[in-house]
């Protein structure tokens, strides 16, 4: 099973135009993730093959919607054990990556991975996105903002838009039909100075189950009152 998925992962790297040598870093990352997972609850995915596909390749799928081979500033909100920010950093070492995570034990793990993989220009922030977004030095400071599996679309847009520079992009991985959530997200976006520019299906083998990448452009500065507190923005989403 796992070996089959290793070849699916290798095929995914090839499909994305990434060199197979990168596999070594991912195998080390996986080993540490599964080892630490026996002591800390970092991921519900415990099968080694599935880690390659559902965490690593899924993180890399973002490149199907957005890619730059220069030193862009990427922010990953609610990164957990590093997804999608760290896999992207491994394959795009020139990117300056900032990871925000609310849970302390995950911060310790993130720092460990950054150290053992000797990743440069990775900033790990322990805190809540809705608080950090109000700090002046982070406002409008990123070219690309992403967040995977953290909250509803409206809530994620409210947390992401304040960090994104005008002309920058927000790419949010989602799955399946979104119906009302997408309609609400689009309305929220208009209040945040953001608009949907593309809805890109993920076409990588092993991930062809309705995954998509919602791409937004920050077309004007996000109003200063956003984001609101987490309790307010989740209980009373913008619409
Ligand atoms: N993005 C990772 C992934 O795709 O595997 C982790 C997803 S996990 C379901 C959600 C993560 O977001 C958790 O680690 C949680 O601590 C973090 N989180 C939730 N709300 C947050 C917030 N407001 N600010 C920062 N981190 C947050």
Image: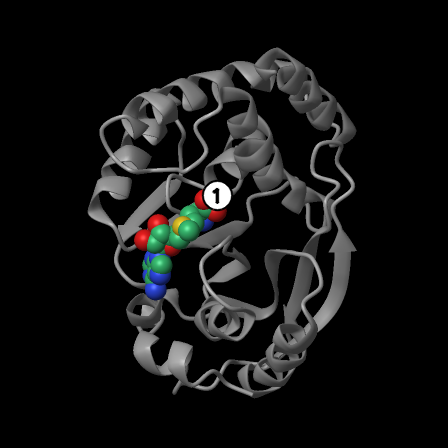
Q: Quadrant of residue 139 in the image? A: bottom left
Q: Nearer the viewer, residue 72 or 7?
A: 7
Disc 1 element: helix
Picture quadrant where residue 23 is located: top right
| Closer to us: 25 or 41 | 41
Instruction: Identify the residue at image location x=49%, y=60%.
Output: 142
Q: Position of residue 41 (x, y in %)?
A: 29, 38
Q: Which residue is mark 1?
A: 85
In the image: residue 190, left or right of residue 41: right
Q: Position of residue 43 (x, y in %)?
A: 39, 37
Q: Is residue 191 visible?
A: yes
At 57% across and 83% down in the image, what residue appears?
Answer: 188
Q: Is residue 95 above or below residue 93?
A: below
Q: Residue 25: x percent and y percent?
A: 49, 19
Task: Name the foreground residue: 37 vs 169.
Answer: 37
- The quadrant where residue 187 appears: bottom right
Instruction: Indicate the quadrant of ligand 1 in the picture.
Output: bottom left
Task: Tell me, yes or no, if residue 227 can be seen here.
Answer: no
Q: Is residue 168 above or below residue 65?
A: below
Q: Residues within 10 Å of mark 1 (few under 14, many from 20)?
A: many
Considering the image in quadrants, where does the C terminus appear?
bottom right
Q: Is mark 1 within 8 Å of ligand 1?
A: no
Q: On the rendered structure, is 56 left or right of 225?
A: right
Q: Nearer the viewer, residue 24 or 57?
A: 57
Q: Quadrant of the N terminus?
A: top right
């Amino acid at each position: 099973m796992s070996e089959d998925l290793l070849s699916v992962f290798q095929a995914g790297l090839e499909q994305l135009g990434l060199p197979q040598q990168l596999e070594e870093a991912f195998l080390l990352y996986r080993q540490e993730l599964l080892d630490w997972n026996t002591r800390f609850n970092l991921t519900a995915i415990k099968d080694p093959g599935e880690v390659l596909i559902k965490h690593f390749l899924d993180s890399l799928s973002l490149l199907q919607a957005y890619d730059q081979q220069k030193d862009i500033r990427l922010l990953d909100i609610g990164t957990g054990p590093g997804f999608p920010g760290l896999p992207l950093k491994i394959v795009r070492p020139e990117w300056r990556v900032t990871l925000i995570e609310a849970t302390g034990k995950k911060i310790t793990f993130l720092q460990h991975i950054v150290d053992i993989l000797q990743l440069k220009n990775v900033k790990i922030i322990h805190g809540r996105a809705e608080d950090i977004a109000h700090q002046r030095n982070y406002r409008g400071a990123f070219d690309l903002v992403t967040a995977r599996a953290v909250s509803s679309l409206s809530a994620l847009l409210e947390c992401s838009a304040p960090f994104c520079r005008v002309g920058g992009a927000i790419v949010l991985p989602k799955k399946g039909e979104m119906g009302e959530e997408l309609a609400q997200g689009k309305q929220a976006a208009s209040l945040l100075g953001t608009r949907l520019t593309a809805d890109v299906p993920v076409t990588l083998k092993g991930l062809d189950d309705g995954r998509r990448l919602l791409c937004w452009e920050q077309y004007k500065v996000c109003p200063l009152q956003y984001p609101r507190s987490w309790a307010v923005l989740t209980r009373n989403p913008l619409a």
